[in-house]
Amino acid sequence: MVVASRRAEAARAFASLELAVHRRLAGRLHGREEGLRLGAGTEPEEVTRYTPGADDVRRIDWNVTARSSEPHVWRTRAQHERETWVLVDDTASMHFGTAEAEKRDLAAWVTGAVGLLSDGPGNRFGVARLLPTGVTWTAPMPPRRAAMHALATTARPPTTDPAPSSVDLADAVAQLERRHRSPGVRVVVSDFVEPDGRTERPFPWESALRRLSYRHAVLVVEVVDPRDVTLPDVGPLTLVDPESGRTAEVHTSSRRVREQYAALAAAHRAALAEAVRSAGADHVTVRTDTDWVADLARFLQRPRAPRRVQRGGR
């Protein structure tokens, strides 16, 4: 009965997400990889003289044929299936939220949205989850099915393990780079909270993200909760670091403490943005207290310069 209830909840969440995506994001991130050479496809690229026995008569360009008095055919630009992988951080710091949802819920919705936007003929979509016990991988599947699976997985309550793994975000990004090398789209969804509390560069995951960006189009989605950036004035608080378990007594009524917290948080986010840019990846921030669909839409609508995909080391 509980399992059926969770499946129904996931189905309702998926229907709501699909409606939002189709209304506000559809057409922004097409799941079709355009090739750089002639081949099987649908978009005309050039017109050549018709060669009997070699060319398809269905591709005869009748306008050019009429003008030149010789039969001509149009050839197409090759189009290939696109493989998209999303790495979702599901460690302890993501199981936190003080607004409309926890960060892990928002990460799942973003994953589902990327899956729906990647939907296209022949495209494949895979999800890797960074758990306290290590990284789990799903087999690549059609994007719509993968998006539904991502929401259903998050609908299950998180599990704890008495023996956590030593795998961190840097290891997970490195695994993603090594396991799936065919050029495609890679998305990393995380709050980027370091277990050691580091807020300055270099971050452990920078080099792995740079290697990932050499071969793929990479998007980093930073998930933020309001309490990640500011402290409320609510008097004495006992704060617990979800990654390390350390506790600290904080007097939030002190204006100086709140300003220091906000300054450190702002510095961390600025350093994170600079690290992502240096790695050659795109960066968008979504928050648990704002309209994340609108934030994602604004990002996808921004004009971008053409990007050259690296095929190997520099």
Image (tube, rainbow, N blue to C red):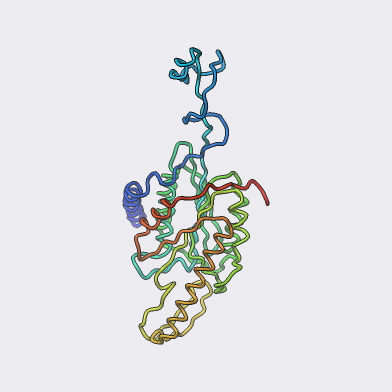
Rendered-image quadrant of the N terminus: bottom left
Is 275 placed left or right of 23 in the picture? right
Task: Residue lying at the far front in this picture: please name it.
Answer: 67
Pinpoint residue 163: horizontal percent, then vertical percent.
56, 68
Numbered-mark total = 0
Pinpoint residue 7: horizontal percent, then vertical percent.
35, 52
Give above or below for 267 relative to 236.
above
Give above or below for 183 relative to 159.
above
Quick one: 27 or 113, which is closer to the camera?
27
Q: Identify the residue at horizontal 43%, vertical 42% (top origin).
A: 119
Q: In which image quadrant can residue 164 be found? A: bottom right
Quick one: 59 or 251, which is closer to the camera?
59
Q: Identify the residue at horizontal 52%, vertical 61% (top origin).
A: 131
Give above or below for 260 relative to 98.
below
Give above or below for 307 relative to 73.
below
Is 106 placed left or right of 241 in the picture? left
Pinpoint residue 58: horizontal percent, then vertical percent.
46, 19
Pinpoint residue 196: horizontal percent, then vertical percent.
57, 73
Q: In which image quadrant can residue 170 be found? A: bottom right
Is 55 placed left or right of 262 in the picture? right
